[in-house]
Structure formats: structure tokens, C-alpha cells
């Protein structure tokens, strides 16, 4: 009884030899209406056995609704038609989906951070058996086999909380494979990974394909996925714009199908006025095991991009300039006045603002209303004569910023957590713009948000710079810094190793420069 | 060795050893078998409650009502036993049934209505304790059934001191240790135990993977209730009187002992071994003060200090481990400033 899981496993491990053309899942005329909202409009969708399929669309395009229907969490309207594994399903539930071998890996991975890798992988088996006792030996065998199948090795006794995002994802995949999987659904799998980690993930997926396991990626960032995808289905406003073969699409076309418009990048060009005192001037900033010999000059109206691999010291430098990671040596001045980087309060008062990378954790109070989040930074400047908060002035401020940043909100009093990723990011921006900073540091400002929202955030950033603000954008994505900055700095191992004029360079040049310095 | 240093338990043990050396240097009576056995007996009450609290904390909850549960189980059982006779086995069985019932109410309320556990159990603490005081009119019970005394005197190992007085391991200590073994087995080797850790680690993940979270929660609070009831009877065995107001008020000390032993208030972490060390550390502080002739009023002060030092130290270590970037900064700069950078033109 205890070994049943392991036996099952060996059977499903056989090489897959069937034809690619058999449809594993076919859905036709899928409609879904929620109280007045037509979330999916007559969508046809299919996945072939062993296929790698991408489902793309901006936020609110209906892709999550479609996925919920595929895994049986939501039921489509009555006229919809679902066939899975050659079998028609009239009332298709979560349990049906599990029996058909459909496994979902959610964006948050749904692992147990407090338990070991081994236990996380083997937990399904513990729950499925009829025995109430744990066999740690059996659990170890299952975990080892699952990892072998994925082709990875992570220390089994490590706590999941101590793993990198990439490793956690592999653990989640290993766990899904302990069941008899036919279709693996990955929700936004690449947002938290570096380029190298994405490549490792894709090679795992390609390997699963050889065993006849289909994969469905749900993403709004397709650039890395497109090269392995057999087919891509794109949704817009609840309608399918089309299903395409992977090789007939490129970034531009995907963007067009997703948004319905072609955005043209307007690069940010400006010639800094070097006769004035620079906005920020840093000389030889160093901190042990963080960054070394940082020389940095930023003029009014400049947007400086900083890129480099994860662990190059970018974020450490950004934190340093905001006073959260003070240098042990070196000097820094803002508008010619010395800037004391060892005191955040002082740095904020001098006019430096910082939007952290992990906006959900660090930038917002998610349960509080939008209005309170926006004015959080400026409470001191909006007091009545009695020293109480001036509600009228604060409300004006909120209304003005909401309008200025085009934040789409039901009401300024709804909690921030009810907003989409892009709008949350705008609330963070609004919070700091309210302080009218002189220098604005943005760490990966558009991670995890879709193209449409991205573009509008970039427009806002450029507008702020034109008004004279100095801006630093830190990003993994070279296009992001290239098309939005006038100067791009490359960091590696704690040092600035290269500086490029955005007008005179291109993506490939920067990429190969980074690669040539990679360890 | 490195792994050992990462464990919270190691530090608690180190503090216990240091304290023991300190106390022994003042009063050599501390480090005797007699004193050790006595400590293990007199702290069985706290120790049994701590097992229940450990389960609740691991599952990500908290319980404030267990002292009230213990008192009700103790009081009702003794009254019934006085009426109908009964036996020790009957007393334990009846108390445990009452405890499970009261615990189930907690678990059900917390899960069904999503009331934060701390609020739920503060409410039920008041409810349970209030009802007891109303119906008992706060009366103490001075005479217990005779088998309460004879059972409390049982020793499973008897030695005698130099001047011929007998001492040894009490049956009460044995009950505590048996319950710790049982708890350790449940936590480490059963589906239920691992599911408790899983729920405490991440409730949403637990639901998604198919763990019946309500069942787990109700089980955990029922188990807490059962242990509180056993502790109630043990208390009656130890002091040979039953007072409706003698236990309530000790909740925070028990929770502190469990947290001292490495359990996390945010759930998902904790072990029986750590819990035992936590209980013993507080016990030794109290015992040591008596042996060192420090006035008892200082007890709370020392307990506060011990908790801050012990919990603070390991939290601080964990914080140091997780924060602070470690970047392998390049040694000799070949190209480091913007002006001389390789890519600039």
C-alpha cells in the first residue's frame, strides 16, 4: 500500500511515443458571465497531447477565468462544450480535472515554506494513501524520483523557505509530477526568475514534453516562452484574437494581438546641462560585500538605467542612495549639498524617493484604502493649525494624483489589494510623487505587470523627468532601460563596469557586454 | 555541528546549563537527583498544558482558554467522583471528554466563523470560567476522593536519600513523559501531525493540496482541550485541593515556555524537545531562585529577562542570516569609473 505511489510513477515514466496531433483537451463555445460582466465570449480552445501551449493576454483579458474553467474551479455557462481525453464532460469539477491529470502550479507556488523539500514534494502521496502513518523512507524515495524525473537535484533536507524562487518553482513542478500528470498549467512562471533560470525551466518543460506531458503557460510576458511554444492563444477583452503557431509570432505581433494597438517606443533623449551643479554626485561609494568605488553623476532631467545580473549589486546600490544601506566610505551630494546616506529620514527630507522591487511587500499597506496609501508620505505637510490631519487638503491631493497617473480605481476608499498589479504599482508611484522628490529611484518598476500598464508607467516616468526630476531605473530587462533612459550603466560584482549612451547603442551590444563579464 | 548551532533548542539548552552551573555554585543541592525528580513532578502540570499549546501554535493558532478548560474539567470531575465514587481511570476519562468538548467548540468557532483565534479563545475563556464561578460560587473543594491521594504517591522508581528518606520518579512525571512521547509521535509520524505543520506553514496551500483544514483545526483545539483536562487532574493530584481560581491566569506563562522552546507564534514551527527545554528553563529559574534565597517577588522579573534574552538572541541570529546582501565584490578594478568604462563612447 505504501509503495503504490512509487509504482505508479515508474509506469508514467515511459517514453511517450503517441502522435502530437491527438487533442487532449478541447473546449468550444466557452462563455462565462459573472453578474453582468461577460468575462469570456464564445472562446474555442484546445491543447494537444504533449504540446507546449502559451495563453497570453493583458490583465482582465479573461485568461485567468479560462484557466479556472480548465482546472474545474469555475463552471462555464450552460451552452459550453468540454471534451477531455476523448470524454465529454457536462458538469466538469475540480475533482474531474485532477482525475484527468490536470495539475496547476499557481504563481505563488503554494508550497509550505516551513517544511523540507522532500516533504513538500511527497505531501500529495501522504494525503492520497489510506495509511495514517508517515513513512519517511517512502517519502524520500518519492521525492528523489520526482527530482530525477525533472532532472534536478536540490538538497532534500533544506527548508523550502531557504531556496531561491527558481528552486522553489522546480520543487513545485516536482510535486505536481508525483501525480499522474497529463497537463501541467504554470501561472506566470517566469516573472520572478532571471534569464538563466528561465532557460533551466524551459529545458525541464521540453523534457516533460518528451514524456507526453502537455504544458500550458499563462503569461503576459512571452519573449522567453515563445521559442519553445508550439502554439500560442491570445485573448483580449474576453475574446480570442487567435491561436497561432509559435514561429509565426514575434514581440511586436504579440503585443498587437494583446492590446489591439501598436505601441511605438519613443526613446528618451536628452543632453544634460553640464554647466549647472549636478543633481546627484557620488564619489567612491563603497560598502564591504555590497558595492565598491561607485562614481555616479546625475543631472536634472536625466533618466539613468542600471542593469546587470541578479547579484551584481544594483539593488544594494539603490538602497544605499536611499539611506538604507549606507556606504562605509565615499562622498555624496545632492544639488551641491552634502547628503548623509546613513539616515533614511534625512535622505527623504532632502528629496530622494525609492520604489522597491517587491511592491506588494514593501511599498503598500494592502488592506488600507488607496487614499491613505497615497498620502502616507506627506502627512506632515498637510496638517491643520491644530496639528490634526487636514482631510480636505489630503483629499485634493489624492484626487489630483489619481487623475495625473490615470489610476483606475472603483473608489479612493477601496483597499489597495483589490487593484490589479499595474494599478498597485501606480499607487506606489503616486505615494512618492506626492512628496515631489528631486531624485526618484525605481527598482524594477514594471515587474509582473502587463504591456499596456507598463507603457503608461514609462510615460509617467518620462514626464516626471522632463519636469526636471532625476530618475534611476533598475531593471533586468535591457529594453526597459534602453528605451526609457538616456544613459545605461552596467553593474557587475558590486562595481559599475560600463556606461552606454542610449542613443548610440542597442540591445545586443549591452547584452553581449553583460554576458562577456558574467562569471 | 553547524546544524546544531542553527537550532534554537541548542541555545535554550546552553542557557539551562549555564544557569545550572551558576545555581549549583551557590547551592550544591540544586544538582541532585532528588531536586531533578522533584522539578519534573512539580512542573508536569505546566508541561502537559505546554504540549497542547505547542500543537495549537504549530497549526498557526493560539489558545487563551485552556486554563479555564482545565479548571472546569478538574472541578466537574472531582464533584462527580465525590458523588459516585469512581476511580482514577474514570476521573481521567471524564475530564478528557469535557476537555475535548470545550476544545471542539473553540476549533469549530474559529474555523466556521473565521474569528481570530485569540479573540475566540478570550471569549470562551471568559464564558467557561464565568459559568464555573457562577455555578460553583467560587467554592473550594478541600476533600478529594481517597484514590486521588494514593495515586499521587505512586512512584515508578524509588531511591532513598542518605538519611533514609524515599524519593523517586512520580507517576505524574511518567504521565507527562508518556504524553510527550505520544505528541512527538503524532507530530513526526502521522498524516495528522504533518498536516498540522502544513496548515501552520500556509493555509491556502494546505487547502489547495486537499488538506481538510477544518478537521485539522478542530482536532488541534480538541487535543489542546484534552491535554488541559489531563493537566487539571494532575493539578488536583499535586495540590490535593481544587480551587476554581488557582489555574486561570497562568496561560501566558505556559505560552511563553512554548515560545521559549522555539515554537513560532506565526505557525508552522516547533518541536516537543524544544517545548520541554522551554518548560524546564522557566522551572529552573524559579527553582534556582528558591535555592539561592532570592525573594519570590523577583520571579517575574527574571522570567521576563530570560524570555527576552533567549528568544531575542535566536531571532536576532535569524535576522542576521536573512538580511544583508553578500556580493562577491570584484577585487582589483580594471575598469570601474564611468569615464574609463569599456562600453562608453
Image (cartoon, rainbow, N blue to C red):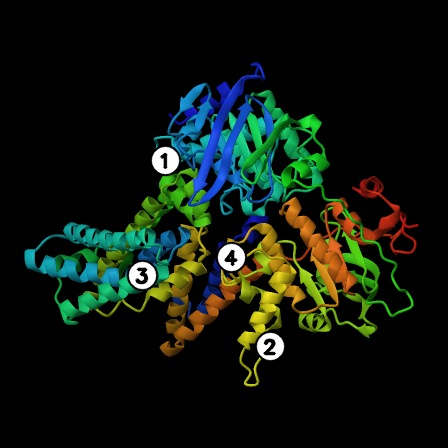
Inter-mark Cα distance, 4 to 2? 25 Å
Residue at disc 4, secondary structure: loop
* Residue denoted by label 4: A410
Q: Mark 2 highlights which residue?
A: A382
Q: How crowded is mark 2: few (under 14 residues within 10 Å), some or many (20 or more)?
A: some
Q: Which chain carries label 3?
A: B
C-alpha separation, residue under disc 3 versus residue under disc 4:
37 Å
Q: Nearer the viewer, mark 1 or mark 4?
A: 4
Subunit bearing disc 4: A
Measure the alpha-carbon separation of dots 2 and 3.
42 Å
In the rendered view, would you say B232 is above or below A308? below
Is A426 placed left or right of B68 in the picture?
right
N-term-proximal mark, 1 vs 4: 1
Q: Are marks 1 and 3 on the same chain?
A: no
| Residue A368 seen in this snapshot | yes
Viewer-side label of 1, 2: 2
Element assignment for label 1: loop
Q: Name the residue under label 3.
A: B121
Amino acid at each position: 500500500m505504501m509503495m503504490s505511489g512509487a509504482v505508479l510513477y515508474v509506469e508514467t515514466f515511459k517514453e511517450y511515443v503517441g502522435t502530437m496531433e491527438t487533442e487532449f483537451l478541447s473546449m468550444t463555445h466557452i462563455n462565462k458571465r459573472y453578474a453582468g460582466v461577460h468575462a469570456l465570449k464564445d472562446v474555442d480552445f484546445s491543447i494537444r497531447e504533449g504540446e507546449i501551449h502559451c495563453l497570453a493576454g493583458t490583465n482582465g483579458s479573461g485568461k485567468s477565468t479560462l484557466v479556472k474553467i480548465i482546472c474545474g474551479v469555475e463552471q462555464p455557462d450552460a451552452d459550453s462544450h468540454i471534451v477531455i481525453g476523448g470524454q465529454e464532460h457536462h458538469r466538469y469539477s475540480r475533482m474531474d480535472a485532477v482525475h484527468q491529470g490536470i495539475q496547476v502550479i499557481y504563481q505563488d507556488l503554494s508550497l509550505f515554506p516551513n517544511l523540507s523539500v522532500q516533504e513538500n514534494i511527497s505531501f500529495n502521496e501522504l494525503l492520497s494513501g489510506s495509511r495514517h502513518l508517515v513513512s519517511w523512507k517512502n517519502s524520500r524515495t518519492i521525492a528523489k524520483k520526482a527530482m530525477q524525473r525533472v532532472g534536478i537535484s536540490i538538497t532534500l533536507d533544506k527548508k523550502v523557505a531557504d531556496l531561491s524562487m527558481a528552486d522553489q518553482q522546480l520543487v513545485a513542478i516536482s510535486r505536481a509530477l508525483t501525480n499522474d500528470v497529463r497537463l501541467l498549467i504554470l501561472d506566470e512562471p517566469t516573472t520572478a526568475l532571471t534569464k538563466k533560470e528561465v532557460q533551466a525551466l524551459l529545458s525541464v518543460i521540453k523534457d516533460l514534453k518528451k514524456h507526453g506531458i502537455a504544458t500550458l503557460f499563462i503569461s503576459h510576458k512571452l519573449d522567453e516562452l515563445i521559442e519553445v511554444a508550439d502554439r500560442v492563444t491570445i485573448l483580449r477583452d474576453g475574446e480570442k484574437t487567435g491561436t497561432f503557431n509559435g514561429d509565426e509570432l514575434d514581440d511586436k505581433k504579440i503585443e498587437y494581438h494583446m492590446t489591439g494597438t501598436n505601441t511605438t517606443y519613443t526613446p528618451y533623449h536628452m543632453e544634460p546641462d553640464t554647466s549647472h551643479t549636478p543633481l546627484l554626485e557620488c564619489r567612491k561609494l563603497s560598502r564591504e560585500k555590497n558595492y565598491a568605488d561607485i562614481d555616479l553623476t546625475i543631472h536634472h532631467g536625466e533618466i539613468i538605467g542600471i542593469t546587470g545580473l541578479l547579484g551584481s549589486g544594483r539593488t544594494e546600490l539603490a538602497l544605499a542612495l536611499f539611506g538604507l544601506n549606507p556606504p562605509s566610505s565615499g562622498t555624496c551630494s545632492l544639488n551641491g549639498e552634502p547628503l548623509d546616506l546613513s539616515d533614511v529620514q534625512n535622505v527623504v527630507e532632502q528629496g530622494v524617493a525609492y520604489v522597491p522591487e517587491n511592491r506588494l511587500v514593501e511599498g503598500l499597506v494592502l488592506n488600507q484604502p488607496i487614499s491613505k496609501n497615497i498620502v502616507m508620505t506627506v502627512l506632515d505637510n498637510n496638517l491643520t493649525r491644530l496639528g490634526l490631519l487636514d482631510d480636505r487638503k489630503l483629499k485634493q491631493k489624492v484626487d489630483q494624483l489619481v487623475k495625473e497617473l490615470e489610476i483606475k480605481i472603483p473608489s479612493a476608499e477601496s483597499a489597495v489589494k483589490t487593484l490589479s498589479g499595474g494599478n498597485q504599482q501606480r499607487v506606489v508611484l503616486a505615494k512618492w510623487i506626492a512628496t515631489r522628490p528631486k531624485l526618484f529611484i525605481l527598482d524594477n518598476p514594471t515587474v509582473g505587470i502587463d504591456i499596456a500598464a507598463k507603457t503608461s508607467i514609462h510615460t509617467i516616468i518620462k514626464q516626471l523627468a522632463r519636469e526636471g526630476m532625476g530618475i534611476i531605473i533598475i531593471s533586468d530587462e535591457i529594453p526597459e532601460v534602453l528605451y526609457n533612459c538616456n544613459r545605461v550603466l552596467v553593474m557587475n560584482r558590486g562595481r559599475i563596469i560600463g556606461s552606454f549612451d542610449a542613443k548610440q547603442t542597442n540591445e545586443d551590444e549591452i547584452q553581449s557586454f553583460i554576458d562577456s563579464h558574467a562569471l | 555541528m553547524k546544524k546544531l548551532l542553527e537550532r534554537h533548542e541548542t541555545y535554550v539548552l546552553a542557557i539551562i546549563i549555564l544557569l545550572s552551573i551558576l545555581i549549583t555554585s551557590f547551592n550544591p543541592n540544586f544538582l541532585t537527583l532528588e531536586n531533578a525528580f522533584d522539578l519534573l513532578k512539580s512542573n508536569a502540570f505546566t508541561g502537559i498544558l505546554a504540549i497542547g499549546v505547542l500543537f495549537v501554535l504549530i497549526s498557526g493558532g493560539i489558545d487563551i482558554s485552556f486554563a479555564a478548560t482545565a479548571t472546569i474539567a478538574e472541578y466537574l470531575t472531582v464533584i462527580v467522583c465525590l458523588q459516585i465514587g469512581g476511580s482514577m481511570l474514570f476521573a481521567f476519562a471524564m475530564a478528557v471528554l469535557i476537555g475535548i468538548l470545550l476544545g471542539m467548540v473553540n476549533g469549530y468557532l474559529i474555523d466556521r466563523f473565521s474569528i481570530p483565534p485569540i479573540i475566540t479563545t478570550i471569549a470562551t475563556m471568559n464564558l467557561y470560567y464565568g459559568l464555573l464561578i457562577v455555578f460553583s460560587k467560587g467554592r473550594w473543594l478541600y476533600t478529594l476522593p481517597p484514590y486521588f491521594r494514593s495515586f499521587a504517591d505512586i512512584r515508578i522508581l524509588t531511591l532513598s536519600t542518605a538519611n533514609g528518606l524515599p524519593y523517586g520518579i512520580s507517576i505524574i512525571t511518567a504521565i507527562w513523559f508518556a504524553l510527550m512521547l505520544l505528541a512527538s509521535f503524532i507530530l513526526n509520524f502521522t498524516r495528522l501531525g504533518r498536516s498540522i505543520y502544513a496548515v501552520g506553514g500556509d493555509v491556502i496551500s494546505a487547502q489547495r493540496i486537499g488538506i481538510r483544514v477544518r478537521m485539522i483545526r478542530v482536532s488541534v483545539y480538541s487535543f489542546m482541550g484534552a491535554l488541559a483536562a489531563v493537566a487539571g487532574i494532575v493539578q488536583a493530584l499535586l495540590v490535593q485541593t481544587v480551587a476554581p481560581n488557582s489555574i486561570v491566569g497562568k496561560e501566558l506563562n505556559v505560552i511563553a515556555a512554548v515560545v521559549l522552546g522555539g515554537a513560532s507564534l506565526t505557525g508552522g514551527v516547533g518541536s516537543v524537545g524544544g517545548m520541554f527545554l522551554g518548560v524546564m528553563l522557566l522551572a529552573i529559574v524559579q527553582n534556582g531562585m528558591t535555592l539561592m534565597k532570592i525573594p519570590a517577588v523577583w520571579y517575574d522579573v527574571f522570567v521576563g529577562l530570560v524570555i527576552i534574552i533567549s528568544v531575542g538572541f535566536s531571532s536576532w541570529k535569524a535576522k542576521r542570516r536573512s538580511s544583508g546582501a553578500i556580493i562577491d565584490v570584484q577585487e582589483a578594478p580594471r575598469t570601474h569609473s564611468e569615464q574609463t568604462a569599456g562600453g562608453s563612447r
